[in-house]
Image (tube, helix red, strand yellow):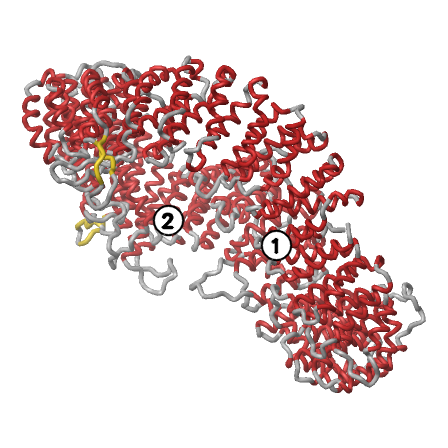
Amino acid sequence: MEETDVEQVTLALLDAATDKDPEVQEQVRKSMLTLGKQQPDRVLAMCQDYLLKHPKLVVSHRVVILQTIELIVGCRIDKISSPRIKSIISLASDEMTRSKEVIPDWQQAASNILVAVGNKYINDIMEEILCKFQPGLLPHYFVVQTLANLSDSNVYGMVPFLNAILGTMLPMLSMAKHDNMKWVFSSALCHFSNSILEYLANLDKAPDPTVRKDTFSSEIFAAFDILFGNWLQSRESKLRLTVAEAVGSMCHLMASDKLEEQIPKLIPAILSLYKKNNEHYVISKSLCLVLDASVSMSSRVLETQLDGLLLVLHLQVCAPVEYSNPPTVKNHNEVLRCFSLLANSFPDRLVMFVLQKLENSNERNRMGSLVVLRHLINSTTSTMENKKLLILASIRQPMADQSNKVKKCVVQVISAMAHHGYLELEGGELLVRFIVQHCALPDTYRRSHRPTDPEEVTNEALRLMCDNTLHLLTTTVGRLADVLWPKLLYYLTPSQYSNATAPLCKSLIVLGNKKKTNQEISFNIDFTQEVNLPSPQMLLVRLLVNAAFPFSSRGHGAPSLSLLQILSVNIHPKTETLWEKDIPPLLSTLEESTTESLDKKQWEEKLLMLLSKTLATIDDDKWVCQLAAEATRYLSTYNNALEEKSFLYRCLGVTLQQCFNKELVKKQLQEILLAARHYDAVEREGVAMAVGLCANSHLEGTLAKLEEFGKSDAFKKSPSIFNILKERNDVEVEKVKSTLILCYGQVALNAPREKILTRIDQDILRCISKHFNTKVLGIKVETKDLTMKLSLIQSVGLIAKAISECVKKQGYVFSRKQELITVMLDFIKAEPADLLRTPVRHLVMTTFANLMPLDPALSENESSDLLKVCVNGVFSLPPETHTPEKTKEEETLDPKQRKALYKDTLAALQELLKSVLVKDPTPDGLQSVFKHIESWLSSGQDHERERAVTVTAHMLAFYLDTLTVKNMVSFHNLGALLGRLSPRCSDPCPAVRTAAMDCIHSLLYIQLRYEGFSLDYKDDGVDSLLLLKDRLDNPDPSVLYKTCSDLTKVMSKRLPQEQLTALVFMLFEGLVDSQPNCCRASSVILNTLLKNRGGGLQELVPEMLEVLHVRLQNITEEQVRVAVGQTVLILASQHLQAVINALVNKPLPYDSWTGEMWMALGADPLVASQILGMVIEKLLIMAPYVDQRESMMRGGTRKVATSQPLAMTCGLKELLLNGQCQEPAVGMFPQLFSCLTVRLGASVGVSAPKDNNTKQTACIHVAGVAADALRILLARAQLDEVMKRLDEDKAWDAIKEPNTHITGVTLLARAMAKHAGPRLPSIVECLCPSLNNIYECQRVTVTAFFSELLNHHVVTELMLIDVLMNNMMERISDPCCTVRKLAVRGLGNIAMGSPEKVNKYAKELLAAMSSGMEERDDPGKLITLEAMSGLSKVLVYLDKKNVQMLVVYIFMKIKPFLESENDEIRCASIHLMGNLSKFGSGEQVFKDQIHNVLVSLLLHLVDPNPEVVKACKFSMRVCAPVVGSDQITAMFQNHLHDEKSLHYGEFINDLTKYLIQDFPGMLNFYHISVIQFFKSTWAEVRAGAAMFIGFLLGNLQEEHFSHLNMGTITKGLVMLLQDPDPVVRVKAAEAMGRFH
């Protein structure tokens, strides 16, 4: 390669160095560097010349070139000649100092070159620089800067010069007047000092080990004097900071006596800088250096500065640290380092200072003091050893601070103290308590969303920190084990620590496990010695209650249970075995559960069972009695957690069951009843359950205690019991009575079954009655207190339940039943009818349900009154979502509570109705209940109907389940019930519809039972109703219509004849239902019923037909019209022609009534078959459209559909919608399919005709109607796969529009060929005549269909190939261009569909394709494209003998298309070339042709079109063997796969190596071919060409350069470097980097 080429390229790169695109700039630099690395002298010379020849070059351009020189010098300094180095030094020195003004970018770049050279040639550099650093003259700014940087980069080379430099520099300092010069001198002195210190620290490596600190001391001090004495007071902040930094570095080099003199002035001066500057890091760093130097020489005067120093350092350490701002973090660390230095010299003074500062309550002050304290504890362990107790005492004050930020610092200090042995000392337990207290913090309560303090420490964050600290203390500080165990147990019981339970338990588990495993004696806790610890009984209670609410207090359930297991022997030695067996399964349950999934009731029962088994296992009455006593005392700690307290009451009940000390039991019951907060409902129930559970073992004692308590002072005006300072009022007495009433109910439920019946009347009900009724002047007055009402209701319910359990074994007459029912009915009547706020209704009805089975039975009137009050009282309530207005007396319920209350109330009503039915399970009994519900079924309110039908459904299901038929009884009310309920299957409310269907299902099964069928008999028809339920979720009227129809068929099949009339007349009544949907359902059910069972009611048919016409005009409900339409079918079967004529003449588009009439006609296969035949015949013979002129003003015509064929198509579409026309549609499928396909072809782009009456164009999509009809036909023929494929391909949208019609037809043919092959012969037969049709559009449609069929082998299997091929050959000469294109496509498709037939038609195929490629009447070259694509496909299967003579001819034909701007043509031509390759193998002429186009193929591998890239990969793979190089063949076949991505650069790089190796003689041809692509249309190809040339040059050996025209290449690349596309410029620059 000639030097001029490299120079030209380098010059071009230098010119392009400031390209506007940053990627190009970067690549230009890389290429210049690459060239520079290869030929450093030459490229550096070019850079120098360029700068010298362009003295006015813009600064940015000069900078890039200077940076390039620096990079080349930096990596190739050993390869650069000495003369060149000297000239570079001279150039850089000149560039750096040419301008007296400071121009940073330019001069810095030049300075950097000098520094880079100075790493090896320090003497030459110093010679040059010192020329410009003369005594008495102020040097250039960057001369000083360069000296400073050299001292950094080459310490060992520079330090020997520094003494002389300092000598020269000192006089200059006083000459510096401007701040920038002062700054650069200060910076240099700082760098020099640091370099000297580094040199002295590494003397063993230094070239001159005799250098000493005092060598520089006097010069440094002289400089220090000027900097400190004059410059430090500058107004310029930046200068002050640099001077301060320099002074700090210089201190270590000053003589000790000089430094000692300066300290009293120096330290205050540096401290004063904090106020003048915002950037404190440099000041702190400097101060740290001064202190280090002072401490190192054991300064005596430093102590005099301590007070001022500590105050300022403390201010600094208190400043906020922004972790996103590194300088503040660095400053903080430097300040802490200062404290460490001082602590080592003055430990007492420093500790006293910090501890005094802790007393200051200012938040920021305290935080800073704590940070210092933590740092001192961690970093100066030995000096702090004798101050531990002092620190422990002093930390208490900040521990009381309310600020979370301070607390966070305290926790960090405690953590440090723990690791250094503070917590074992006296007072250490307070630190542990502090951590535990803050593990128990509640969540932060935020009132507003104001911007939060970035340093804010939320309760959550502080709590998490304390959790982690407690865990760390437990797991990492081994010596703390005996401090924490067992003392942490203390914190488990006080309620203020409840939120810390989880972390406490976890720590105790770790400690306990460790001690237990190591068999340490301290594992066993002596509770008598550890007086502060809770007793074993207290721990058991607390941990059990925690476990009952496992997801509360941050999930304390599982840790509490685990701890209980660890503590087993400490709780009681006998528990260990039991708990090891029973607790792990409980823990497994918790692991698998969430708050939502855990069955709370079942979980609590398991825990109570564990407690019961534990107490039985312990078998120690004294221990159990103590547990009962302590649990009772512990109750008050749960006053703010009533759910937990309620569970504790139950635990207490279980404990009392196991107590054998009767006196203690009575005492505990007394305490429970006295201490209870009776005004709270949850607590009342808890007390009652405890008393009830106790009664299981102590019935006599419990009843006696309750009676005694009922007579006690609790019911008198005595303030002492409740510790209140006013007299007890009536309300409180009522609450206590409520508790007692509930207690009696629970006693009845839990007492032993054999003892309770005798106690019900005399002991329990008498006492309840006594408490509930109050005597005024001897007359009983019932209370109005809601609490007492609810307690009475619940209690009576519990008593009824208890009696029910007992009477199974013993007979019993509950004499006070009616009295109780009357009282409770009054409760319901007293409730507001329009409001549900209390559980009175649901509790009363639940109690009624429990009372119903008990004797004596109610009379009919009593039962009816009860049901009426209850049903009306529930059904009349407003909807659940209704929010009542808030009143003064009552609090409104939240939505969740209201929802639960509604649910419970409705469920209670259902249970009540069931209990009534159980007493009289007969049709009359059913009717006696149903009559109360019946009127609500047709209410105008959705929620009322829903309740009525839902309750009816439950009632009928229950009736069916409990039905026992002993005699043949008539279910006489079946018809009326069905008539009332069946229209509800169409109710607008989905829940009503579903429930109504359940009702009918139950009714029909009840009828089957009465007919004598067995209990296990299953009727498929009736069971099919359950399948219909899914349809009811869909509000679509047509779905509901079908459902009602199917429902009626089932009903009519199962309905006895004598019930039919009742049903029909009830349905007539349903036509005026309050809901339109149900009117509709009534009509549908009525019609279907008449159709199926009308034989017995024929007189109704004329009456219905008479009103049909009039009614249809006004009926708006869809399904009613459909039902009436079915009746019309009868008329059509007698007068088909007249009905059809009338419908055809209806205006288009058809209204919904007309459409449904057409659809109804499809219900009868015979009628439908006649209509289909008629329509096909008319569509074949009638003109599909007429050409009309657009207007008089505008020329041209438009196609307008003729009315009758369009109307017929519309009618056909509607008729096919009816599923029952499937049989005739399938029978005539080929004719219908062909007819509609041709009709579709003739409808695309056709306008709708004008309406004869309005003269307005009908709003109808002509092609859309035909497409819809065809789609429905496919569905009727059950061609589901065809439909699925067409839907996936969106074929229906395509087939309707002119632009995409052919695509749509192709998709249709493809789907038919793949999924409906056997139907094709008859379809093809029907379609063939249309190929000669006069309508061009129909020929296009059929040709497109046939063309695609040839793509599938099925046509050969069906022996259709000859017919289709002949048709295609005929269409080659069709006058229509589109038809010809489709014919060529079809001929090509034979290769895909029937490859074995290709050679049979070889001559015809090649002739057709050749003529296609030469087609002149071919706008857009579409026929040419089809011909090439088709030929590509055909060639794969043609024999060599049929093609060999034509290969070169075809090759020459397609070569011009390789660079076509049409992507598809380019793609097809490349693909075809690949397919030709197998016919040219072994032919030299073909090999030459391949080499002719190889460059084109290689460059199109980066074509912007991915399909062209695929085609190139394919062609190159198949042509590979023809190329004539094994290595290139292997490359093509290994790397050019469609699914693999190609790294183009690596690929071309390797390929050029093989081209050079295997075809050196063709290099000239290749590079000329590539250069031609420098002007390609596509940027990607131009970039690829640049890469190709680059890699060719990079891999070319010297001897081959003669083959290339380097001048042309250089010129071309220089041109590309100015290309508008940055990608091209990048690749051109990259290629230039290979010119070496």
Which amino acid type is shown beneath numbered disc 2?
A: Val
1276 and 1604: which one is in front? 1604
Residue behind mark 2? 682
CA gap, disc 1 and disc 2: 37 Å
850 with respect to 1155 (left or right): right
Considering only vertical position in the picture, is 1046 above or below 1496? above
Looking at the rendered structure, the secondary structure element under dot 1 is helix
Instruction: Using the image, determine if residue 1345 lies above or below residue 415.
Output: above
Place residue 305 in its image quadrant. Answer: bottom right
The number of discs equals: 2
Residue depicted at 62% across the width and 72% down the height:
319
**Residue nearer the viewer, 678 or 1444:** 1444
Q: Secondary structure at mark 2?
A: helix
Up-down: is 1590 above or below 274?
above
Q: Is residue 378 visible in this depiction of the protein?
A: yes
Q: Amino acid at mark 1?
A: Asn
- The answer to whether residue 778 is left or right of residue 1432 is left
First-in-chain label (1 vs 2): 1
User: Which of label 1 and label 2 is nearer to you?
Assistant: 1
- Residue at horizontal 50 percent and vertical 18 percent from the top: 1403
Locate residue 411, reporting x and y percent.
62, 62
- Percent position (x, y) of residue 1428? 50, 29
Residue 558 locus on image (x, y percent): 54, 43
Q: Residues within 10 Å of mark 1 (few under 14, many from 20)?
A: some
Image quadrant in which you'd find residue 847: top left
**Which of the 4 quarters of the picture holds residue 1164?**
top left
Q: Position of residue 1326 (x, y in %)?
A: 31, 17
**Residue 1115 vs residue 24, the one in the foreground:** 24
Residue at 79% x, 53% y: name it: 38
Q: Give the residue pinned by disc 1.
A: 468
Q: Looking at the image, can residue 936 be seen?
A: no
